[in-house]
Image (cartoon, grey):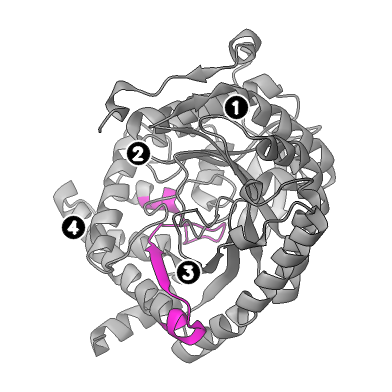
Amino acid sequence: MIETGEILQTLRMIQEENFDIRTITLGLNLLDCSDENPERCAERVYTKICRQARQLVPVGESIEKEFGIPIVNKRISVTPVSLICQGDPRPIAKALDRAAQEMGVDFLGGYSALMHKGATLADERLLESIPEVLSETKLVCSSVNVASTRAGMNMNAIREMGEIIKKTAEKTADSDGLGCAKLVVFANAVEDNPFMAGAFCGIGEPESAINVGVSGPGVVKVAMEQIRGEPFDVVAETIKRTAFKITRVGQLVAREASQRLKIPFGIVDLSLAPTPARGDSVAHILTEMGLEMAGAPGTTAALALLNDAVKKGGVMASNHVGGLSGAFIPVSEDIGMIEAAACGALTLEKLEAMTCVCSVGLDMIAVPGDTTAAAISGIIADEAAIGMINNKTTAVRVIPAVGKKAGDRVEFGGLLGYAPVMSVNAYRNDDFIARGGRIPAPLHAMRN
């Protein structure tokens, strides 16, 4: 039972501390839509999404109005398209986009392929189509899993993804490479992630599920302001207690949406997802711990404490915590990260170190337009290696800014924000990426 005190605390978090439910995401299994004819498959996909998701937005809006809790996005995630497509995947992409627009959702994820051990013909067809699809659709998001702790790293797929990201940036150059903001490359991708661009409905998921992603960097920041100068034991305890409150609200919204839609409740993802709004920054939580700017010595340690405390607090508030869960560090979506990158306090190399202890990886980072495909593949490989060795999810969402150089700026708008273009190490790695093949799984993967 939720007590009066909790209600009052929640109201304060919403009114004064930028708290929101970042997304209600409906996961849908589309395996029964597979057909050898791409047009028939696309029509089945469109029909099923429209049938299952028709009430998603109205229910989300009704919960928002009744409880007074902002729900920023309503989204859909579907079975990775390469698993259902037996031919050209582009008709399916168009059907996904049409259904998403008619249902009124903000994004749809699942134009995806799982290639951590190798590629099927369907995987290759989907990869080849990504630049065109992301430039011609409005709401479709794409992801590719190229590595896992169990399987190792598929360097052929990593090489291809560098080229695909470059092509996608070129096809969407008029919007500062916006297509790349809808494309993420994973290691150890999870099946119940409600956040875009990496959301998809994994093969271990039920026929449908409601997954909720909460947010609240501003709430944590305000809590930290009350304990300035206190030791880290107090810091960790304060973050845990705050994460508990945030996750309790997410649990409430998830169960309410599940009951009204008559769809099983999946998970609450308790990630601290920032926005470009001041007062809603993960980086500013780190500075509240005593750092002058994100990127200063000690940043990785501060982020490790934050990520761990958020998870410890969240798991006490919900029986079903999942997704990514922790702290996100997207550059363009976090005003503190934007400021740190712009003044040089935060570099690509420091961000990579931080990804060893955060929830995902190198996220929403703009790089010079002349960055080579091999360099992008190298960035993906480095991040995938961190995920593989540490048995954690890592990801890369990088945007080559066509015609721009380090120090320039790209603009995406909305939650995607804006970002300074960050420099990339200029030394070549072409021969390394050209090798292809697989980097074997680490020894500790053999746990049978």
- Per the image, the residue denoted by label 3 is 209
Q: Residue at x 29, y 28 (%)?
A: 446
Q: Give the mark nearest the N terminus, 3 or 4.
A: 3
Residue 343 in view: yes
Q: Are marks 2 and 1 in contact (CB under 8 Å)?
A: no
Residue drawn at x 16%, y 55% as measured from the top left = 234
Quadrant hosting residue 13: bottom left
Q: Earlier in the sequence, mark 3 or mark 1?
A: 1
Residue at the limit of the structure toward the front, as seen here? 36
- 3D distance between C-alphas at marks 3 and 2: 29 Å
- Per the model, the C-alpha gap separating discs 3 and 4 is 32 Å
Give the residue number, with chain letter if any, for mark 2.
357
Q: Position of residue 447 (x, y in %)?
A: 25, 32
| Residue 137 in view here | no
Residue extent of the magenta highlight:
256-285
Give 324 or 303, whichever is nearer the viewer: 324
State the CA–CA distance, disc 3 to disc 1. Answer: 31 Å
Q: Quadrant of the N terminus?
A: bottom left
Q: Which mark is residue 237?
A: 4
Badge nearest the viewer, 2 or 1: 1
The type of residue carrying mark 4 is Glu
Crowd rating for badge 3 (residues with CA inside 10 Å; few <14, some 14–19, many 20+): many
Q: Is residue 280 above or below residue 265?
A: above
Q: Which residue is mark 1?
A: 158
Q: Are marks 3 and 1 in contact (CB under 8 Å)?
A: no
Residue 53 sits in which quadrant?
Answer: bottom right
